[in-house]
């Protein structure tokens, strides 16, 4: 039982990272119907910016984290302005391919820095140890990760419900024509959605850095794990991203905890989310909270 | 008087004439010259060049398959390398028992079955959702091979040496032999590809791509068409996979990974989606770019080579990604469009009209 609970708790921690990463992904999809294959690279850019600032400039990790959030948001903003804007109105395949191409470009650029290969860990900025009850132990960084995710989600919730820009973004997601005629700048909203996605991606990268080490492949891999999360939650649903993220994180941990023993080589956790993805696509393609598309001739 | 060698006007009087592939004798002649040129080309190339040429032709074959799925039927496929992998692993398993000319179609058929299975979700979902389903298939394929002891867990599975009509393929003639085999298969399948759109099935592919609800209303079956498109495209990929296995002498999972699937999509787009010539231009362009970037990275290393940085592994994805992005922004119709412009310029040459 305690083994199960332990898996559950660490699943929730991993899941909150996925939830944050998926949040940005859904933001982009909701605003501009673009699937962002470069999302894992945004996560990596955020994490390594923080690492570079903290180690080479010697600033405190908190300042480095803030700078990383800002920098990645700017990267997201300019990505939309420079690469996505010329493709508005092009077929889906062009838009998907341009994000795949960008993923390759970002990967190449990160490889030009010393962070392309090897493992890095952010300087310790949290107290060691953790709490344990009923045989389950949770480290402080893990607790902080969940708390941080909660704060982030609450902040985004407020942003979408109350702030003018957030309401404009929801309006654009709902109906571009109507929001345009009401004076919302759709272009600006697209760019802001990308900036916000960069911000949340960087936050996810920072939490990975706080819990475990940073590694380019691992961070980019989170960008792929986002797909099961958003399909389960519904591609255009922000609560879906959060719920889906936590469910996928838990399922992944349970799968590797209970099934690895039966599979030669193990590693079930890496692939289990994609089985879930296929099952969801077969039986409930629009996920838990996604809007069903109704087509008429 | 009509000149059969040049297009001096529109002399077509029937539907049959309108659907001919070759409008003039000069087009037929240039195709013959091209084929003969390809046949004698190996005489002038060294082993290293042949290796690259083989690779380009094999990739061209796979990209033709992707062009059926993504170009004709409009189904985004991020799992094409997995179809190729299915073919390659089938080849590795049956090659000890069958001659190579039987292995190729068998691999193609097994891959086609895999393609049809992957295509089944297309009955229900489309566009982005389908693309994500193929992505999941790619990742599950890689994982499944990596955890199968029967497939060496993704490690190298050696391919047997080929003997054809008493002619043993060894070190010296390996790339030359497989060049001719690949070329023959490619001509055959490219011929089928070119004629696909003249068939009922090919036209329904395009109809389903452009508007599947309208196609449904016209009496076509969009679901079945999509599944067949996947099967047919996967057949091409499977044959390419078997050829790749023979060509590289071993089957390794890295050759059929997500990166390669992305490469195929990039090749199809850079070449020009849904075009025959694009299926050749795309692989040639991106492979040659890749090789040149390797040389270029040595040059970069003279200027920028800090410790802990592998410039070689940075420059190649950078150039690859930039090629995709720049083509999509500035020439979405790909290299095939340049070819079309070039041809239309020379159509009436040296006359102005």
Image (cartoon, coloured by chain):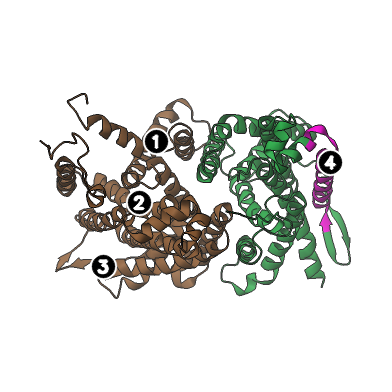
Chain colours: A green, B brown
Quarter holding residue A168: top right
Determine which residue is flagged by label 3: B100
Residue at x 78% of width, y 31% of height: A63
Residue B59: which disc?
2
Q: Position of residue B345 (x, y in %)?
A: 26, 29
Q: On the same chain: label 2 and label 1? A: yes
Look at the image and tell me in which quarter the C terminus of chain B lies. top left
Residue bounds of the magenta highlight:
A138-167
| Cα–Cα span, label 2 and label 3 | 19 Å
The local crowd at label 3, few if under 14, some if 14 to 19, many if 20 or more residues have their Cα within 10 Å, is many
The local crowd at label 1, few if under 14, some if 14 to 19, many if 20 or more residues have their Cα within 10 Å, is many
Q: On the same chain: label 1 and label 3? A: yes
Q: On the same chain: label 4 and label 1? A: no
Chain ID at mark 2: B
The extreme front residue here reads B13
Q: Where is residue B320 in the image (x, y as percent from the top left)?
A: 45, 39
Is B27 placed above or below A265 here?
above
| Front label number (1 vs 3) | 3
Residue B346 appears anywhere in the view: yes
The earlier-in-sequence mark between 2 and 1 is: 2
Residue B293: which disc?
1
Quarter holding residue B339: top left
Residue B91 appears anywhere in the view: no
Is A88 placed above or below A254 here?
above
Chain ID at mark 3: B
Q: Is mark 1 on a helix, strand or loop?
A: helix
| Front label number (2 vs 1) | 2
Q: What element carries label 4?
A: helix
Determine which residue is flagged by label 4: A161
């Amino acid at each position: 039982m305690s083994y199960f609970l332990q898996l559950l708790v660490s699943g929730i921690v991993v899941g909150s990272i996925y939830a944050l990463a998926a949040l940005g992904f859904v933001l982009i999809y909701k605003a501009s119907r673009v699937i962002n294959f470069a999302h894992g690279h945004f996560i990596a850019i955020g994490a390594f910016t923080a690492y570079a600032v903290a180690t080479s400039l010697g600033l405190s990790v908190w300042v480095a984290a803030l700078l990383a959030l800002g920098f990645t948001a700017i990267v997201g903003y300019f990505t939309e302005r420079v690469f996505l804007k010329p493709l508005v109105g092009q077929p889906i395949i062009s838009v998907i391919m341009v994000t795949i191409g960008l993923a390759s470009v970002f990967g190449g650029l990160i490889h030009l820095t010393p962070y392309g290969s090897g493992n890095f860990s952010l300087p310790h900025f949290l107290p060691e140890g953790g709490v344990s009850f009923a045989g389950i132990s949770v480290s402080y960084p893990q607790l902080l990760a969940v708390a941080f995710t909660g704060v982030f989600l609450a902040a985004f919730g407020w942003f979408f419900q109350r702030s003018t820009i957030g309401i404009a973004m929801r309006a654009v997601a709902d109906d571009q024509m109507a929001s345009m005629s009401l004076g919302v700048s759709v272009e600006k909203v697209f760019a802001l959605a990308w900036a916000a996605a960069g911000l949340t991606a960087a936050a996810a990268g920072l939490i990975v850095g706080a819990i475990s080490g940073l590694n380019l492949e691992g961070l980019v891999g989170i960008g792929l794990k986002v797909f099961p999360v958003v399909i389960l939650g519904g591609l255009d649903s922000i609560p879906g991203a959060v719920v889906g993220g936590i469910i996928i994180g838990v399922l992944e941990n349970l799968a590797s905890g209970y099934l690895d023993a039966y599979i030669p080589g193990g590693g079930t956790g890496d692939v289990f989310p994609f089985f879930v993805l296929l099952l969801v696509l077969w039986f409930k393609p629009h996920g838990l909270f996604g809007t069903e598309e109704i087509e008429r001739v | 008087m009509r000149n059969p060698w040049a297009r001096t006007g529109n002399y077509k009087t029937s539907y049959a004439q309108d659907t001919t592939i070759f409008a003039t004798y000069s087009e037929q002649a240039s195709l013959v010259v091209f084929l003969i040129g390809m046949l004698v080309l190996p005489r002038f190339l060294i082993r290293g060049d042949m290796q690259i040429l083989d690779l380009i032709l094999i990739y061209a074959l796979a990209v033709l398959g992707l062009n059926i799925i993504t170009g004709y039927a409009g189904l985004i496929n991020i799992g094409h390398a997995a179809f190729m992998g299915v073919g390659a692993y089938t080849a590795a398993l049956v090659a000890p028992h069958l001659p190579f000319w039987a292995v190729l179609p068998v691999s193609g058929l097994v891959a086609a079955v895999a393609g049809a299975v992957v295509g089944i979700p297309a009955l229900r979902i489309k566009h982005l959702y389908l693309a994500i389903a193929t992505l999941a298939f790619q990742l599950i394929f890689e994982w499944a091979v990596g955890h199968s002891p029967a497939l060496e867990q993704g490690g190298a599975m050696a391919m047997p040496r080929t003997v054809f009509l008493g002619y043993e393929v060894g070190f010296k003639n390996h790339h030359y032999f497989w060049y001719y085999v690949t070329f023959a298969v490619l001509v055959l399948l490219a011929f089928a590809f070119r004629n696909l759109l003249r068939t009922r099935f090919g036209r329904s592919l395009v109809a389903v791509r452009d508007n599947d609800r309208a196609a449904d209303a016209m009496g076509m079956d969009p679901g079945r068409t999509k599944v067949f498109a996947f099967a047919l495209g996967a057949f091409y990929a499977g044959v390419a996979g078997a050829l790749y296995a023979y060509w590289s002498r071993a089957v390794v999972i890295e050759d059929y990974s997500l990166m390669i699937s992305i490469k195929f999509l990039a090749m199809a787009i850079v070449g020009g989606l849904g075009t025959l010539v694009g299926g050749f231009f795309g692989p040639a362009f991106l492979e040659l770019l890749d090789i040149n970037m390797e040389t270029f990275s040595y040059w970069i290393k003279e200027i920028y080579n800090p410790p802990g940085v592998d410039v070689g592994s940075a420059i190649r994805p950078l150039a690859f990604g930039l090629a995709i992005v720049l083509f999509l922004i500035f020439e979405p119709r790909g290299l095939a469009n340049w070819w079309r412009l070039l041809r239309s310029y020379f159509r009436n040459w040296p006359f102005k009209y």
